[in-house]
Image (cartoon, grey):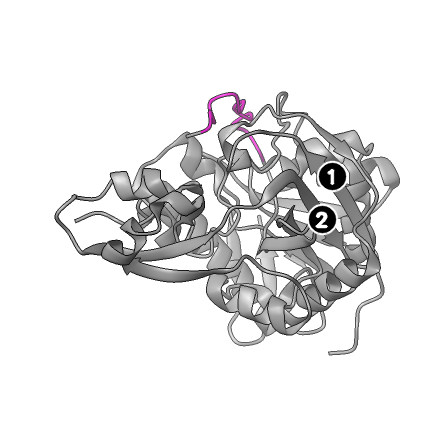
Amino acid sequence: MADTTKKSQAPKEYKTMAIPEEPGDDEYKTMAIPEEPGDERQKQASKKAFGEK
Amino acid sequence: MILLAGGALDPHLTRALRRAEARGIAARGLLVGPETWPTLTLSVPDGALILDGEALAPSALWARHDVFAALADPRPAVAARALDWYEALLGFAALNPGVNVLNREALGRRVNKVAALGLAARLGLRVPKGVVTNDLQALRARAGEGLVAKPLRGGGLCVPLQDALGEQAAEDAAAPSPAFVQTRLRGPELRVTLVGARTFTFALHTEALDHRATPDAPFERVDDPPEEVLGPLRALALAMGLQLCAADLKRDAEGALVLLEMNAQPMYTAYDTACDGAITDAILDVLSAPTQAA
């Protein structure tokens, strides 16, 4: 799995009126981040192509 | 006013908010954080929205299903919360047909990767040749052909077929789940991000079979694919109801571009930075366009 730990934490005080500050290292490309979150089935997918017993 | 809604940890939304402010575009965030969230009331069935005590009537909405909170905190409640907010926003979009909603026709619609490849082929795009199967017995006989395997629903990387077979019990004739088995394609991988009528194409240089295995792989902006590929890509986006999406392409043995998949909620911040925020600007332009008649 690709490393997803370099993502920085955003401040916790977000309000709907506020425009958050630059969260820092947010240079995501497409790596290791689900692109089709659609529903919870993404999280339930096996890491093995042909599934697990 | 544009409403930009999703997770507070989603950098795509936060940079869009900052860029809107810099351009003088009226925009407001509805951002759900790890520990704080706004107060929302959506009237049903009239669709009136009250956000933090204020009645809002946005002209446009960009709602992103938040996956970043769950990456930071894997508790099921976090993912469930993200889905609940996304459902509320889909409800707002449905009750307000006059609002310019990005990817309106696709919101809440799950992309079936097999169906998407079938549609792409009908529209004239090359797609990977292969099968969906769990027939381990047949696949073991083809293990030397240089094929690849990948899950039908994401969740795992594309791997050499031999590696995927190695994860299964040697005595089993049928695997627990069917998966894609396809011909191996060649890089560099092209990522074409489509935003309305605009396109942003980058070439990603990696030796890895799946680019997600090499998150620091170098990339560069390149010319868009030729029209015989770009035209069908646009048609595919239209057919899938996507104004914002990103296509992944590689080349087959003949050198022709082959569509791997179309992503309905693309991640693009590094590419956006590389083109001075042009992707974010293009999204804001689409959201700022005059509202279509309901």
- Across and down, in percent, residue B150 comes to 41, 48
Q: Determine if the magenta segment contains residue A9.
A: yes
The magenta segment: A2-14
What distance separates the C-alpha of mark 1 from that of mark 2?
9 Å
Q: Amino acid at mark 1?
A: Phe
- Across and down, in percent, residue B217 comes to 62, 26
Closer to us: A35 or B186: B186
Closer to us: B23 or B169: B169
- Across and down, in percent, residue B230 comes to 77, 58
User: Image quadrant for the N terminus of chain B?
Assistant: bottom right
- Across and down, in percent, residue B176 comes to 21, 55
Q: Secondary structure at mark 1?
A: strand
Category of crowding for the residue at label 2, using alpha-carbon neighbours closer than 10 angstroms: few (below 14), some (14–19), many (at least 20): many
Q: Are marks 1 and 2 in contact (CB under 8 Å)?
A: yes
- Who comes first in sequence, dot 1 or dot 2? 2
Viewer can see residue B146: yes
Closer to us: B148 or B227: B148
Q: Chain of mark 2?
A: B
Query: Please, is residue B76 above or below residue B225 in the view?
Result: above
Query: Please, is residue B291 above or below residue B188 in the view?
Result: below
- Residue to which mark 2 is pinned: B193
Q: Which mark is residue A18?
A: none
User: Image quadrant for the C terminus of chain B?
Assistant: bottom right
Q: Amino acid at mark 2?
A: Thr
- Residue to which mark 1 is pinned: B202
Judge depth for marks 1 and 2 and give the one in front.
1
